[in-house]
Image (tube, helix red, strand yellow):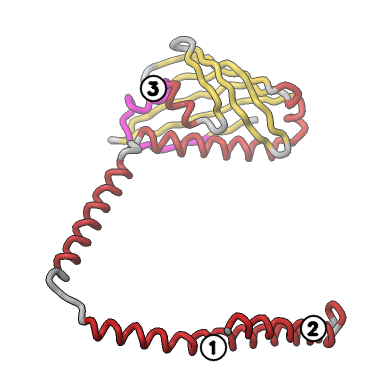
Amino acid sequence: MDLVGEYRLLAGRGVVWSALNDADVLRRCIPGCQSLEKLSDREMSATVVAKIGPVKATFKGAVTLENMVPPESYTIVGEGKGGVAGFAKGSADVSLAEDGDATVLSYSVKAQVGGKLAQLGSRLIVSTSRKMADEFFGKFKEIVEGDGAAPDADASGGDASAASSGEASSSFAGVELDAGLAEEAKTQALSDAPHRVGEAVSEAVHEVETEVESAAGRGFLGGPVVWGLAALGVVIVVLALMS
């Protein structure tokens, strides 16, 4: 299986390189990752729960970083075993290229699977791998570009909302509601309520009648007699709710 991809990240190459070598960042980005431990500067161990089609398994494996050229590129070599589900092993060449203030991350993966995973077919495996890669780099992009930007925006929005609310409150300061007008409005609302309920009920009954006529015409569940009794029961319930 071969898989290639490219992502443009709004962060400096040094920041992206550091994140790619940060076990905590990788753990947060890898879909289904339960644990990721950095054993040395070039070795990591991981436990990942993955689901490919009908096969779901816990994979335990080791990852080694090779051909390191900081902060430009490296090769990830790894193998994971999922018990009866099978195994997966392969390598990925990762490179970082500066693009102004941004960084273009490119990767090329070569991998092979065995066991039940191999029986699922290459199309399903490739599509699932692509989905997991998109999830990984989507989260990675959020982290390296600064996931603190959104809360700041929310905070500023909250401040603006609070300011607007304060202005609205101050604009009504000193205004007193007329008790007579308030009582009149309340009385009018209560007097209109039965009329509005009656209209809603009439519409509901009309819809029921339409559906009943349609079902009766089709002879569904016994024909017109059964549906006529059902309609009568619905009308009785509606009238009871009105009362």
Local packing at callout 1 (Cα closer than 10 Å; few below 14, some 14-19, many 20+) is few
Q: Which residue is mark 2?
A: 227
Q: Is residue 101 left or right of residue 228?
A: left
186 to 68, vertically: above or below = below
**Please, what is the three-letter code of the amino acid marked with disc 1?**
Gly
**Please, what is the three-letter code of the amino acid marked with disc 3?**
Glu
Label 1 sits on a secondary structure element that is helix
Q: Which residues are magenta?
A: 5-22
Label 2 sits on a secondary structure element that is helix
- Queried whether the magenta region covers residue 188, the answer comes back as no
Q: Residue 162 versus residue 29: which sits nearer the camera?
A: 162
Picture residue at 69% right of the left edge, 84% below the top: 236
- Queried whether the magenta region covers residue 20, the answer comes back as yes
The image shows residue 51 at horizontal and vertical percentages of 66, 35
Q: Residue 1 versus residue 18: which sits nearer the camera?
A: 18
Name which of mark 3 and mark 1 comes first in the sequence. Answer: 3
